Image (spheres, rainbow, N blue to C red):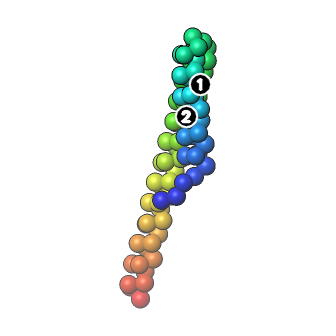
């Protein structure tokens, strides 16, 4: 299974958001804390989309491989 753009970008956003959330908490900036939490959750969602995309892609490739094997076996 490969890695796609959504997985990478999502996990980066998730990490940046977590850091921003913690920095906001430490500095007492509720606004930065909330912005970080939102960014973290958006990144997590994007990473999940990437994960699902890769799983679907892998399943399609497996089904194609199986169909090719069955086709060869019939001939």
For this view, does 13 lie left or right of residue 68? right
Dot label at residue 20? 1
Residue 42 is at least partly visible in this image: no
Classify the position of the C terminus by image quarter. bottom left
Q: Mark 1 packing: few (<14 Cα in 10 Å), some, or many (20+)?
A: many
Q: Give the image location of residue 63, x and y in percent.
A: 43, 66
Q: Is residue 73 above or below residue 44?
A: below
Q: Quadrant of residue 24?
A: top right
| Residue beneath the point at 54% across and 54% down | 3
Mark 1 or mark 2: name the one nearer the start of the chain.
2
Q: Quadrant of residue 13?
A: top right
Identify the element where label 1 is drawn. Answer: helix
The residue to which callout 2 is attached is 14
Nearer to the camera, 38 or 12: 12
| Residue beneath the point at 49% across and 48% down | 51
Viewer-nearest of discs 1 and 2: 1
Q: Is residue 35 above or below residue 57?
A: above
Q: Give the image location of residue 2, x and y in percent.
A: 52, 58
Q: Quadrant of residue 70?
A: bottom left
Task: Report the Cα–Cα distance between label 1 and label 2.
Answer: 10 Å
């Amino acid at each position: 299974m490969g890695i796609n753009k959504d997985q990478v970008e999502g996990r980066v956003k998730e990490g940046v958001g977590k850091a921003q959330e913690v920095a906001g908490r430490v500095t007492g900036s509720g606004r930065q804390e909330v912005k970080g939490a939102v960014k973290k959750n958006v990144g997590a969602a994007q990473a999940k989309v990437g994960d699902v995309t890769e799983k679907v892609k892998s399943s399609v490739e497996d089904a194609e491989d199986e169909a090719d094997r069955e086709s060869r076996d019939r001939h």
